[in-house]
Image: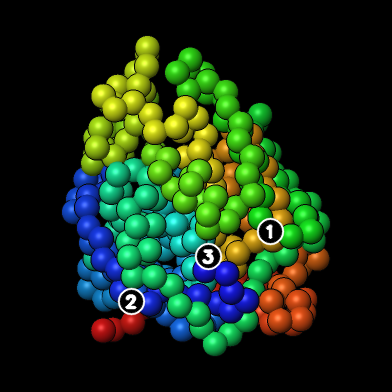
Amino acid sequence: MRTNNQTTLKAAATLSGVGVHSGNPASLTIRPAPANHGIAFLRTGTPLGNDRLIKAHHALVSATELCTVIGDVETGAVATIEHLMSALFGLGVDNALVEIDGPELPILDGSAKLFVEAIDRVGLTTCAAPKRWLKVLRPVRIEVGRAFAELRPIDRGFRLDVEIDFDNPVIGRSRKAMDLSPASYRRDVADARTFGMMKDVERYWKAGFALGASLENTVAVGENGVVNPEGLRFADEFVRHKILDAVGDLALAGLPIQGAYRSYCGGHRMNVGVLSALFSDRANYAIVEAAGSRQGTLVDLGASIGLAAFVADV
């Protein structure tokens, strides 16, 4: 769908499965939302017994170890949001309410494929408001050891350039660059699955991670090759999945980005960190809209850092 207006789903889409880290069953429903709503999660079954609405915003990220978590664990959080956020961002969905009945989204097949298929089944519709973008005006960069992530200005669109470099001969070093569009996302990104190394499994289990991981939802990497009997979906599936994760994490900017993203040995922490660097100075970005491309006149996202998740009794 090419449009100068914001988009949302035509109807609700429901999926269920298990959380890759918790191993617990989870069900979610992606619902249509009005213009300027953005993406938000309605978490039910919280520790306090109240439903909790959590904006999909980088300032509300509470953890980035092996997955991206928003909200407060003690009062209600949502984990492993990156694959769904990636599908929404990749397909150009501006507004949606995601109702989730537990603390972690289902991993499904380990990619964004089933999220994309669910959204495609119900279709998208336009909202009565112009589409808006977050335009990068000045380069920003963060570094952690040898890893780095940066955003820089470009004339139009959103470009990703992601490089991985693992001390594992099966994964190794790989780099992929692409211009993001719904068509390129479906073709090149959505099917790429999450992956992990067999030697790390016991350590993850002891730390409370990967309790729901299996060959049905994770590419398992052994010493001599991929353990999954079907092999890889792409020869470079590992770096493609890192792009999938980056798209999902960068969606936490709150608006689609007009700019170029580059990372080396990045991950959830770096993806979210570069957004914090971008929003640290109002001169780094502007808000533009399809009609007239007026800059900085709609919503000051710098001010929106103060947005807090709130509890609603339902």
Taking the image as drawn, is residue 14 in sight? yes
Which label number is shown at residue 11? 2
Q: Residue at x 51, y 51 (%)?
A: 185
**47 over 142 or under it: above or below:** below
Q: Residue at x 30, y 48 (%)?
A: 107
- Spatial CA distance of label 3 from label 1 is 12 Å
Under mark 2, the amino acid is Ala
Q: Residue at x 48, y 46 (%)?
A: 187
- The residue under label 1 is 157
- Spatial CA distance of label 2 from label 3 is 16 Å
- Spatial CA distance of label 1 from label 2 is 28 Å
Label 1 neighbourhood size at 10 Å, few (<14), some (14-19), many (20+)?
some
Query: Is residue 135 left or right of 76 when viewed as pictured?
Result: right
**82 over 12 or under it: above or below:** above
Circles 1 and 2: CB atoms closer than 8 Å: no
Quarter of the rendering occupied by the C terminus: bottom left
Sequence-earlier tag: 3 or 1:
3
Taking the image as drawn, is residue 280 in sight? no
- The residue under label 3 is 92
Under mark 3, the amino acid is Gly
Q: Residue 265: x percent and y percent?
A: 59, 33
Sequence-earlier tag: 1 or 2:
2
